[in-house]
Amino acid sequence: QGVDKVYLRDCTNISTMATSTNRNHRERRPRSRPPKHDFYISLLTTALLALSIVRSQETDEPIDYGNHNPEWEDGPSSWEEFGHDNDPSVCGLPVLTVEEWEAGKYWDGNKPVLVKNMTDGWAALNHWKKQEMIRRYPDAEATMGDGRRVGEVGPDDAGNVLSPTTVKEFITKNMYHPLKYFFDRKIAIPNGMLEDCHPFPMPTRAFLENPETGAIHALSKKKKVNPKPPFEIWQDHLAISIGSDLQGLSFHFHGEAWNVVLFGSKRWLLWDYARFEKNVTRQRHFALAGEGAPILSSAEWIRQLYSSPERMYEMRTHGHDCIQHAGEMMFVPRKWMHMVVNIGDTVSVISEVGLEKGEGKKPEDFEYDPDESSDDSEDWSEDNSEDWSEDDMEDDSESEDWFTYVNEE
């Protein structure tokens, strides 16, 4: 019936979401059941979804992609496929306390870290439960779009890849659509939602407590000024991400940022910027299936490309593959390549260096086509931290060949 296979594969969990109401992903270990069981369930749900799409085309009835589960924890989860136990040989990140994070000022470093118990005391643990969030903040505005494309072009320059929505509209009508992900770095968050996340993690909290932190007196201007350029200052930026199982941005990079999960879990793949800083060939070999190949969604990249010897070597030697659980914060250093896959319905809050409090988007922000933009258009971060496909990256022919490691072993 003209339904794309990739679309259906990405939708494998959608019909399960629409018909199941009491599944819970809190169990961290795989259930013991025959391997073929999951295959047959997947085949059945895909067939049911295909049938529902065909019927909707014939009757012009819209498909219900809303999340009608009682709470976030009741949605389907791909833990059995994408979860793991953060073995040091796979993840390898230090797990810090909040006190260690602040005392060590790890945000000034160039290594990722996980911080536990970051949400202790946050009102959001109650106010952002699914039903309560809809009740309190139904009209909070943001955008939704395909996480693969948003990761490719960046949320600030995504144009018509994104469409405007609200918290209530997204959750109740669009959350289980395979190409809808609630994420916007320019969201105009209501003050109540911001207050729900107090105390903010450092260093964002320092700016809120005193915007002149780090400033010095400038006699010529007769006032205090911060000697750092704006793109190096942690300001009052905060963004919210809401997505269903398997959603998440594809490979990209930007300025330093932290991400705190309140509900659900995320799988992170992080790759050291030093490995591709002057070698765009290695970068493209790592991220793409081949020359001219499209960017895959995060889940499909793991399924199709991750197991190759070259990529596995890069991740085990120069990267990190980690699970972030609810209550934990992931710190991503400047320009580290990363992708994210949600495991279960996931809600998180993000801050990035150099960005100010969002003021929302205007209608004209959704009118242009990013694929038709000129090569010299602004990159997707105000702090000059380009996305992974930047054109001005040097292709250093003197750098080690992609397959050199095979000969070294």
Image: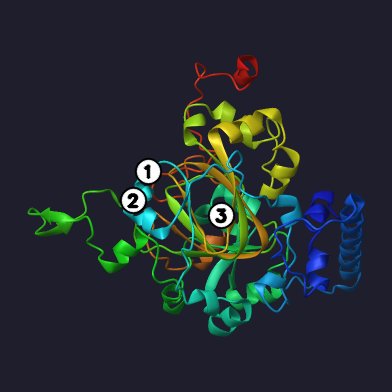
* Mark 2 → mark 3, Cα distance in angstroms: 33 Å
Tell me the residue that label 3 is attached to. 158
- Residue 146: image location, x then y, percent: 65, 56
Residue type, label 1:
Gly
Q: Secondary structure at mark 1?
A: loop
Judged from the image, the secondary structure of the residue bearing numbered disc 3 is loop
Distance of mark 2 from mark 1, alpha carbons? Answer: 8 Å
Out of 303 and 380, give the one closest to the viewer: 303
> Mark 2 vs mark 3: which is more N-terminal?
2
Image position, residue 105 (x, y; %): 34, 51
**Which residue is label 1 attached to?**
109
Percent across and percent down for residue 322 are: 59, 48
- Going from N to C along the chain, the mark reached first, 3 or 1, is 1
Residue ID at (55%, 76%): 128
Residue 34: image tag = none
Q: CA distance from mark 3 to mark 1?
A: 30 Å
- Eye-nearest disc, 2 or 3: 2
Q: Are marks 2 and 1 in contact (CB under 8 Å)?
A: yes
Q: Is 72 drawn above or below residue 218 in the view shown?
A: below
Residue 130 visible in rendering = yes
Q: Kindly give the residue lying farthest to the bottom in the view shown.
A: 135
**Relative to 219, residue 171 above or below:** below
Binning the other alpha carbons within 10 Å of mark 2 as few (below 14), some (14 to 19) or many (20 upward) gives few
Q: Residues within 10 Å of mark 3 (few under 14, many from 20)?
A: many
Q: Is residue 195 left or right of residue 390?
A: left
Q: Amino acid at mark 3?
A: Ala
**Residue depicted at x 30% and y 62%:** 206
Label 2 sits on residue? 105
Q: Is residue 172 left or right of residue 236?
A: right
